[in-house]
Image (cartoon, helix red, strand yellow):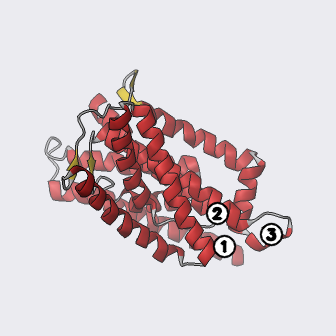
Amino acid sequence: MNAFLQGCLLQTTPLLLTSLGGAFCRTAGLVNVGLDAFILVGALAAEVTGAATHSALLGTAAGALAGALGCFLMGSVITGLGANPIVTGLGFNLFSHALCRLLVKTAFGVSGLLLLASCPKLPAVSLPVLGSVDILTLLAWALVLVMTWFLDRTWLGLHLSAAGSEPAMARTVGISAPRMLLFSTVVAGALCGLAGADLSLGIVGAFSDDISSGRGYVALAAFYIGRNRPLPTALTCLFLTALEELATRAQVLNIPVSLAQAFPYISVLVLMLLQTLRTRHRHGGTLS
């Protein structure tokens, strides 16, 4: 049981960081479908920098910086050129996968998996019951509280929410919606970069061109179900990860593997359906 809880907590971390970034962007009015791209660039930057500096912390910082710069570039294309956010995000996803493959092949002469022996792993902390977890796991759950406080209690967080929900009204009181959106992309990109660093320096221990495993897309569902609020989003991530852990342990629990592997995806669809029905019911009640 302890191993199951530890696995859930560790595997939740990259999804949670990514989902918090997506929720932050959504609060500012942007549905960021390019999250997968910045997990990938963050993972590669963390692996290479960690190996070059022999420091997991510097590798983690490089991952966050790479994600922030990449997401800022995407935000600049959207706000500066008026590009469609959905198309732009998907384009960045495709481009980042191609670029990372090219860089790994050109610089290291390998395809698929990049394992640098000199790259250290993330420091770990031992917790009662849960066992050993890396420091980014602790940071991710601390950020749930910090982001809740930031959005509800600080003027910048309130400005961010205003710019996302009522951009025209926000403009009349001097709040720049495009600036708030760009700010949100930097934060989201940094969080996705940290998620990538957690994968390449922690969970996986290497870089691969499919290291994100679609977490950016699952994160879209997580913060939608969580209504862009940090704590409900975090609990959704934990629930979905627990289902994935059950899928990996399906044979031990005598559950058909094919059925267990479908659990997370079925649950996402069911939860999103329930969320939609709840929203429609609420709006219907208001209108009546």
N-terminal-most mark, 3 or 2: 3
Looking at the rendered structure, the secondary structure element under dot 1 is helix
Q: Which residue sits furthest right?
A: 173
Q: Is residue 260 left or right of residue 227?
A: left
- Which amino acid type corresponds to the residue marked 1 in the rendered image? Gly
- Which amino acid type corresponds to the residue marked 3 in the rendered image? Arg
- Reply above or below: 5 against 103: above
Looking at the rendered structure, the secondary structure element under dot 2 is helix
Q: Nearer the viewer, residue 255 or 228?
A: 228
- Which residue is identified by label 1? 285
Q: Measure how far apart labels 3 and 2 are at the Cα level.
A: 13 Å
Q: Position of residue 214 (x, y in %)?
A: 34, 60
Occupied quadrant, residue 24:
bottom right
Q: How many numbered marks, from 0 up?
A: 3
- Which residue is identified by label 3? 171
At x 34%, y 63%, the residue is 99
Tell me, yes or no, if residue 238 can be seen here. no
Image quadrant for the C terminus? bottom right
Q: Is residue 65 left or right of residue 283?
A: left
Q: Which mark is residue 181?
A: 2
Q: Position of residue 1 (x, y in %)?
A: 28, 31
At x 57%, y 59%, the residue is 185
N-terminal-most mark, 1 or 3: 3
At x 58%, y 62%, the residue is 26
